[in-house]
Image (spheres, rainbow, N blue to C red):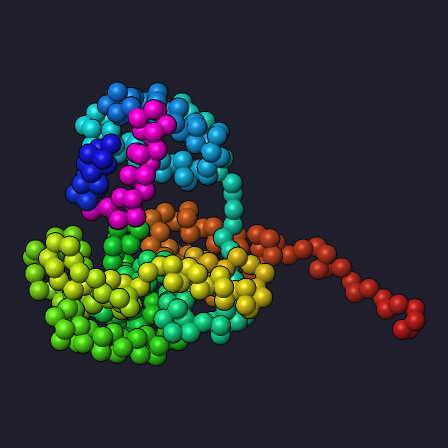
Amino acid sequence: MPKLLARVRMAIRARHYSPKTSRAYAQWVRRFVRYHGLRHPDELGVEEVNAFLTHLAVDRTVSASTQNQAASALIFLYREVLGRPIPRPARYVRAKQPRSLPVVLTRSEIGSLLTRLDGDVRTIALLLYGSGLRLNEALQLRIKDLDFERREIVVRRPKSRRHRVTVLAGAAVPPLRARVEKTRVMWERDRQDGGGWVELPDAFARKAPQAGRDWPWQWVFPATRRYTHPHTGRKHRHHLHPTVIQRALPRAGRDAGLPKRVTCHALRHSFATHALEAGHDIRTIQELLGHKSLETTMIYTHVLNRGGLGVRSPADELPPEPPPPSQR
């Protein structure tokens, strides 16, 4: 199985999938092989894939999105790695897809949350809410992606793999400028010490070998520790790890006494909902969020601050009740 997983990872890298996808697909291939008694996938087919997907829904009670990811990983395995495409699995028990609405914080809740954050965590939270970024999009920002004069952020290599431009909130400009200055000091110190390198996307490192040490390509939010690249021996610095933010936000929400589940994505949901409440066109919001389908963005029309589906309750039309007899 190690050789098989190595082939899976190589095929994923060749197609420029994200490291997160690489880890997920390799995990599903491993679980598929183990479920069928360590038999090689070449000995298995679509029936065994259907059985595994049914097992996930019935025995493991996974969500529909998790089951869909497993199906995609196995289709990729047979089509791209083993070279024998199988029909898309269809005869399996499908996990139920619950209809859930996104968690949206009010403006006062956002303000209460931000007052309990500081440093890079607060700046990143401002970007999630003020620009509608996903967490990884904020962490993977490079110096060249910020345009303070035009108040814009270029989001490169997002989930949809289509670059986009989104708004840079004025409230985020001062702390972001301060962060960039700190990053420059760190970068100059690293260069003096023989470091200052960062990872470059895809094959750009071969086209511009020295670009990984240039200022425009540096991470806006660099990690506090450096590492030595295993192949080149250069001293690199990665961007801040997602868990730093993922742990800080829920903790700040609890400290603020918020009655909602505070996550990084809740700030992105709040950006979209509040932008719609302010009267911005839904297709503009779709572009800012980077959604492929307008249907994905439409869910925010159901959580606008106008009551259920924007309907005014008839109870609000009742005449005022007369005061109690004791007050007449």
Residue 2 on the magenta segment: no
Where residue 284 appears, as percent x and y from the top left, is 37, 59
Where residue 156 appears, as percent x and y from the top left, is 25, 58
Q: Residue at x 67, y 55 (%)?
A: 313
Whether residue 307 appears in this view of the structure is: yes
Residue closest to the eye, 226 or 84: 226
Q: Write down the quadrant of residue 327 in the picture.
A: bottom right
Q: Residue at x 20, y 67 (%)?
A: 218
Say whether residue 230 is left or right of residue 155: left
Where residue 120 appears, as percent x and y from the top left, is 36, 71
Residue closest to the eye, 103 or 272: 103
The magenta stretch is: 15-38
Where residue 139 appears, as percent x and y from the top left, is 31, 62
Q: Write down the quadrant of residue 149 in the picture.
A: bottom left
Image quarter where the C terminus lies is bottom right
Image quarter where the N terminus lies is top left
In the rendered view, would you say 118 is above or below 233?
A: below
Q: Residue at x 17, y 72 (%)?
A: 190
